[in-house]
Image: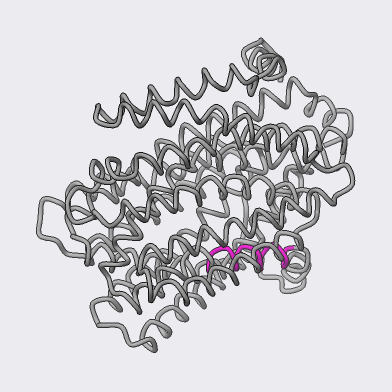
């Protein structure tokens, strides 16, 4: 892509519309995806019961924790390089798919060996065996989602995810009509992953890039070297997300895992819009780093401001409404999940902010910063889990992961402040104060209306927050101008 085309492509009006469009694609599709995944978890949790749902959650967490070894940062690097120069797509995709095929076979064998060495009951081992095949499928699907992100075709990534969750929901409804057999839900997960991988690969080959399989060790090494810091980050992050579930399973049993997983999966769903926005703006960050660093700083400050105004009220309001939300979603047997949800709601807010800051460092060729941050978060999380899970059970795992996410945000934000031309601390502090001030009347409304219909309460609370945000000038003329730019006709 030549400089003139790239400059026109990243013109503020064009870039704003494109990021908004891709955010909308990802947010709507990810919202639908999260809604369907939430429904799957709801059906599975109610049908299997706390103990069996905990066993399934452990198996998926255990497999996911090791599945990260199939990525090694190659996905994020591919998206970054394709965003800068689409002509490199075939070389990257052909080599990385071959790497993932080999790595997936090794990881599946590793998972089988480890789950046997850890001394789990045969039922748990059997479920892990079944779920381990999801490693190869998720490796392919997740990589193609990075490819779609590089081409800024977020709607294709969204469709790939929806394919999987649609199959999960349909299958869960059918399975719920029979007796509760945990292995059937594991097989359903693997089958849905297979269909998603086939869909993503087929669409990418037809619409974007037709790859082969390149088994060329020299080229593999050339790709590995720049991707290694990103790979370490991804590995640390996955172990950070899922080591608490594994420790809970060993120290507190399957019921504790079910209680924690029910709340944590809700928290992950709450963060969908923030993650969608962060993913949509990543290619823009990557190009602005090459073409216009001043606009990169402006884009980051604006994005961080919007992310804060979006994510902070979610954490506060879910903390206030945790009990009725949990009761509505999961019913009896999951009362303990309300206390966990009050804590992990703050994880969802911090995770959105960290996602944005991390993507900026990755896009600006500073993956070592994110690697260091993820290592610190992992260390805090493991230490917290070891100390708190024996004392507090599922709540201890929740407190641990929030502390780890807060430590990560502190590291990334401090590093941004030290970056030449980085974000302005006082302006960001003003954004936080405006959000907090607007939340006061929103919390009052939530408390007064707590006995009403939950959906009505949430709508009223959101209206109160937006009205207060306007009153304290948390939404300004620049925001209105951007909204007008989004709806104005453009050639972008």
Q: Where is residue 253 in the image (x, y as percent from the top left)?
A: 28, 74
- Magenta stretch in the rendered image: 227-239
Please tell me whether the stretch drawn in magenta is mainly helix, strand or loop.
helix
Position of 161 with respect to 483 (left or right) is left
On the image, the x and y values in percent for residue 107 come to 50, 75
Identify which residue, 154 or 467, lies in the foreground. 467
- Determine whether 470 is above or below 340 in the image: above
Task: Give the quarter of the image for residue 7.
Answer: top right
Q: Residue at x 54, y 20 (%)?
A: 468
Picture quadrant of residue 379: bottom right
User: Split into 4 quadrants, where in the image is the C terminus?
Assistant: top right
- The residue at 14%/61% (across/down) is 180
Q: Where is residue 112 in the image (x, y as percent from the top left)?
A: 40, 81
Locate residue 438 relative to residue 413 in the image: left or right. Answer: left
- Residue pictured at 67% horizontal, 32% vertical: 431
Q: Nearer the viewer, residue 231 or 93?
A: 231
Of residues 293 and 339, the one nearer the viewer is: 339
């Amino acid at each position: 892509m030549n400089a003139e085309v790239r400059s026109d492509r990243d013109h503020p009006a064009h870039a704003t519309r494109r990021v908004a469009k891709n955010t909308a694609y990802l947010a709507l599709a990810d919202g639908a995806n999260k809604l369907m995944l939430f429904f799957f978890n709801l059906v599975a949790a109610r049908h299997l019961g706390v103990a069996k749902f905990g066993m399934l959650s452990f198996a998926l967490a255990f497999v996911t924790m090791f599945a990260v070894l199939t990525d090694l940062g190659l996905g994020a690097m591919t998206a970054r390089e394709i965003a800068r120069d689409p002509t490199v797509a075939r070389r990257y995709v052909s080599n990385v798919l071959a790497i993932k095929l080999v790595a997936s076979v090794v990881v599946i064998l590793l998972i089988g060996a480890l789950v046997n060495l850890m001394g789990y009951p045969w039922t748990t081992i059997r479920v892990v065996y079944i779920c381990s095949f999801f490693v190869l499928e998720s490796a392919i699907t997740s990589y193609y989602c990075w490819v779609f992100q590089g081409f800024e075709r977020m709607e294709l990534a969204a469709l790939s995810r929806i394919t999987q969750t649609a199959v999960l929901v349909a299958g869960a409804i059918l399975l719920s009509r029979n007796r509760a057999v945990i292995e059937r839900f594991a097989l359903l997960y693997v089958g849905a992953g297979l269909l998603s991988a086939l869909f993503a690969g087929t669409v990418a080959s037809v619409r974007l890039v037709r790859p082969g399989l390149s088994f060329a060790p020299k080229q593999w090494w050339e790709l590995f070297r720049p991707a290694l810091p990103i790979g370490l980050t991804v590995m640390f992050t996955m172990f950070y997300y899922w080591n608490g579930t594994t420790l809970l399973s060993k120290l507190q049993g399957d019921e504790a895992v079910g209680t924690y997983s029910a709340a944590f999966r809700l928290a992950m769903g709450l963060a969908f819009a923030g993650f969608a926005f962060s993913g949509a703006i990543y290619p823009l960050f990557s190009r602005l780093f090459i073409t216009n660093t001043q606009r990169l700083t402006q884009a980051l400050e604006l994005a961080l401001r919007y992310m804060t105004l979006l994510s902070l009220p979610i954490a506060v309001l879910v903390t206030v409404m945790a009990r009725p939300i949990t009761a509505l979603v999961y019913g009896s047997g999951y009362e303990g999940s309300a206390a966990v949800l009050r804590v992990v709601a703050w994880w969802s807010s911090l995770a959105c902010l960290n996602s944005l800051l991390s993507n900026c460092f990755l896009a600006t060729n500073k993956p070592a910063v994110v690697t260091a941050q993820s290592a610190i978060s992992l260390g805090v999380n493991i230490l917290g889990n070891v100390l708190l899970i024996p004392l507090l059970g599922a709540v201890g795992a929740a407190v641990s992961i929030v502390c780890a996410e807060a430590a990560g945000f502190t590291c990334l934000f401090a590093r941004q402040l030290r970056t030449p031309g980085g974000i302005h601390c006082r302006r960001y502090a003003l954004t936080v104060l405006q959000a907090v001030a607007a939340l006061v009347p929103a919390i009052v409304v939530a408390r007064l209306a707590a006995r009403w219909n939950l959906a009505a309460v949430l709508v009223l609370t959101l209206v109160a927050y937006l009205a207060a945000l306007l009153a304290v000038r948390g939404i300004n003329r620049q925001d209105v101008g951007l909204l007008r730019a989004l709806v104005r006709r453009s050639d972008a």
